[in-house]
Amino acid sequence: MKLNNPTWAPHHWIYGVMLMLLGLFFYQHLLGQLSFSFGIGHFISDLKDFLQLKFIGPDEEGEKKFWGID
């Protein structure tokens, strides 16, 4: 069974920003620090889409590169 990339799903950088904001709100707790760190990783992994201001929709199909990194 193949999972398709839905056209209605937001890009990962949006989840990263939400996790970073949540982490800043709870920065004194371990869970808040982990949330912030995970949010940074999510944001950086989709930085190209953030710079192009892509909000919703799947990534374009293209040539696969080393480890799937754009």
Image (cartoon, grey):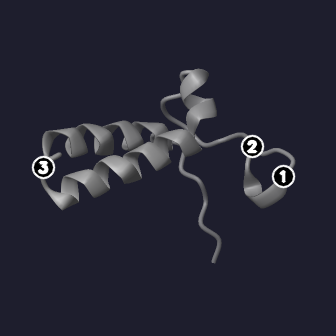
Secondary element type, mark 2: loop
The residue pinned by badge 1 equals 65
Residue occupying image coordinates x 14% and y 47%: 26
Residue occupying image coordinates x 41% and y 37%: 14
The residue pinned by badge 3 equals 28
Along the polypeptide, which appears first: circle 3 or circle 1?
A: 3
| Quarter of the picture holding the N terminus | bottom right
- Residue most toward the bottom? 1
Q: Amino acid at mark 2?
A: Asp
The reply to whether dot 1 and dot 2 touch (C-beta < 8 Å) is yes
Residue 35 lies, in percent from the top left, at 29, 53
Secondary element type, mark 1: loop
Residue occupying image coordinates x 63% and y 32%: 48
Q: Amino acid at mark 3?
A: Gln
Residue 5 lies, in percent from the top left, at 59, 53
Secondary element type, mark 3: loop
Distance between the alpha carbons at the discs numbered 3 and 1: 39 Å
Along the polypeptide, which appears first: circle 1 or circle 2?
A: 1
Residue 52 lies, in percent from the top left, at 61, 22
The residue pinned by badge 2 equals 70
Query: Would you say 36 lies left or right of 12 here?
Result: left
Vertical relation: 54 (above or below) 12: above
Location of residue 62 by image quarter:
top right
Q: Which class describes the residues within 10 Å of circle 1: few (<14), some (14-19), or many (20+)?
A: few
* Residue situated in front as seen by the camera: 54 or 67: 67
**Which of pointers 3 and 1 indicates the residue nearer the eye?**
3
Residue 47 lies, in percent from the top left, at 57, 34
